[in-house]
Image (cartoon, helix red, strand yellow):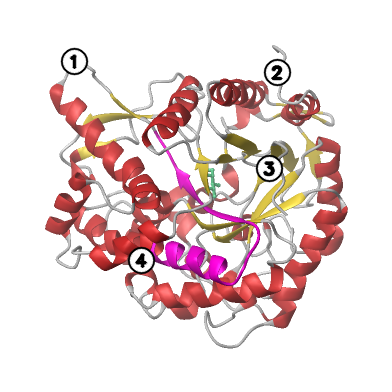
Amino acid sequence: MVSTKFLWGAASAAYQVEGAWQADGKGLSNWDLYTNVYRATETVTGKHETGNVAINAYDRAQYLQDIALMRELGINCYRFSLSWARILPDGVGRVNEAGIAHYQQFVVDLLEAGIEPIVTLYHWDLPRALDDRGGWQNRESVGWFRNYASVVREALGAKVSKFITFNEPFIDLFLIEPMIENIKSGVGSPFAITDAQYGHQAMALHHWLVASAETIGDFRAAGYRGEIGVALPLMPTIPENPGKSEDIKAAALADAVINRWCLDALFKGRYPIEVMTLFRQLSPEFAPFEADFAILAANKPDFLGVNFYAPAFVRQADSAPLGYDWMNTNPDPEPAAFNGPVRPDYLRRLLERIRDEYDNPAIYITENGAGFGPSDEVMDGDTVHDPRRANYIRRHIEAALKAKENGVDLRGYMVWSLFDNFEWLHGYGRRFGLVHVDFDTQKRTPKRSFDTYRDIVANGGVTVPG
Ligand code: NOJ
C-alpha cells in the first residue's frame, strides 16, 4: 500500500474550504460558533466573515471540477482534513452516515483521478458538543479523539494510505485559541496573550500529543497498512540582534517551545527540560508525565509532516507571553509575506537539523506557501499575476530538494494552498492559493504561480529561473 514515488501535492483544511456548514446532518463545530456567534474575524479584520460557504468544496459538482484542476496541475497527492462534526455530530456517540459517505466518495473520486488522498484527522475544528465539555483541556479529549479516529479508520482506512493525526499544535493552541478566548471575553486586544493562557494551553497540547500517540498505537493494533504521522509548524528561531544575550536566550526558549517540544515528544518520547520547568511553574497540573511519556515513546509516528513558512526573528519582550516576541519582528520590506520573513535556506537547515537530531525520520513537507496581499494578486483579464508567490514556491522547493540531496529522507512536498480560502481569523482577506477564487461566484482562475508549480512538478522538481 505504501508507495515510494516522490509526492507532489497541495494541502487544505475542512473548515477553510468545505462550506455546507449545516448540510447532511453535520453537527456544529467550535469554528461555526467562533465565526457566526462571536464574529471573531470582525474583531481582527473589521469584516464579519464565516466558513459557512467557504469555497463550496463539499459540493460534489464543484469538487469534481477542482479535481480536474489538480490533474491539470499534475499533482499526485492531495492533503485535506475531515470535519469531525460531520462524522460524529455530537463529537462522540451517534455516527452520521451521510458525512462518512461524503468522504468515502471524495476519496474514491481522488483515487480515480490518480491522486493519493492524505487525510488529516484534526485541523482545528472541534465539535461544539466537546468544546462545551472543556475541549482539549479535558483529559477525556484523548478518548474522544481515539474514538473518532477509529470510526474514520474503519470507514476510510482501506483506501487511504496516509493519515495525519493533528495539524500544527503550537499555532492552534498557543495563538489562535488564546486569541479566540480574548475575543470572547471582549477585553483588550485579541493579540494580548498571557503567560497564564500559555500555562492553561500546555495541558491541551499534552492531551493532543497523548491522543496522537494512542491513535497511532490503535491504528497499528488494528492492522492498518498505511502510514500515520503528525504535521508540525516548524520555525527556526533567530535572535533579532545576534549580539544581544537577551535575544539569544529568547530565541533559544522560543525554539524549545515552538519546535523542540513537539519534536522531542514525537521522536524521543519526552519534553525538553526547559519546557518541563517553565510550564510546571505556569500550570500545577503539568507533570509528572512518566506514564504518558511511555505512551509517546512506544508510538512514534511513521513520518513527520513539516509545515514551513518562515523562520522567526525573536526579541526579548517583557510584555509578550514567556517574555519574547516573534510576531512583530519581520524585517522584510513591504509587501511582506503574511506568515513571516522569506528565507528559503532556513527550510534546508531545518530539514537537515531534523535529520541530525531526530534520527533522519521520513518527512513530507505538508505545507509551504505564501501570500503577499493585493499587490501580488493582480488580475489582468483572465490572468492573475503573482510573481512573489511563484518565486517563493520555486525557491523553497529548491531548498527542500537540496536537503534531500544532502541525505534528508524527504518524500514529498505539498503547497499551501491550491485555492484561496478562509484564512481563519483573517477571513477571506489573505489569499494563499495557486488558484484565485472569486468568493461571490466561486469562479476559479489559475494564477501564474499555478503554471510555475505545474512546470516544476512536470520536471520532477527541477526549477527554472523566472
Ligand atoms: C497553517 C495552517 O495549517 C493553515 O490552516 C493555514 O491556512 C496556513 N498555515 C496559512 O496561514
Q: Indicate the amino acid at tag 2.
A: Thr
* Gap in angstroms between the C-alphas marked 1 and 4: 38 Å
* Gap in angstroms between the C-alphas marked 2 and 1: 37 Å
In the figure, 37 relative to 51: above or below?
below
Q: Is residue 32 visible?
A: no
Residue in front for this viewpoint, 423 or 364: 364
In this view, the mark in front (2 or 1): 2
> Would residue 321 appear left or right of 61 to someone viewing this image?
left
> Would residue 17 appear left or right of 342 to someone viewing this image?
right
Residue density around tag 1, few if under 14, some if 14–19, many if 20 or more, within 10 Å: few
Residue density around tag 3, few if under 14, some if 14–19, many if 20 or more, within 10 Å: many
Q: Indicate the amino acid at tag 1.
A: Gly
Verify CB contact (< 8 Å) between mark 3 and mark 2.
no
**Label at residue 463:** 2
Residue 443's spot in the image, x, y percent?
Answer: 81, 47
Specify the quadrant that holds the C terminus: top right
Q: Secondary structure at mark 1?
A: loop
Residue 203's spot in the image, x, y percent?
Answer: 28, 64
Verify CB contact (< 8 Å) between mark 2 and mark 4.
no
| Residue bounds of the magenta highlight | 209-235
Residue occupying image coordinates x 45% and y 32%: 355
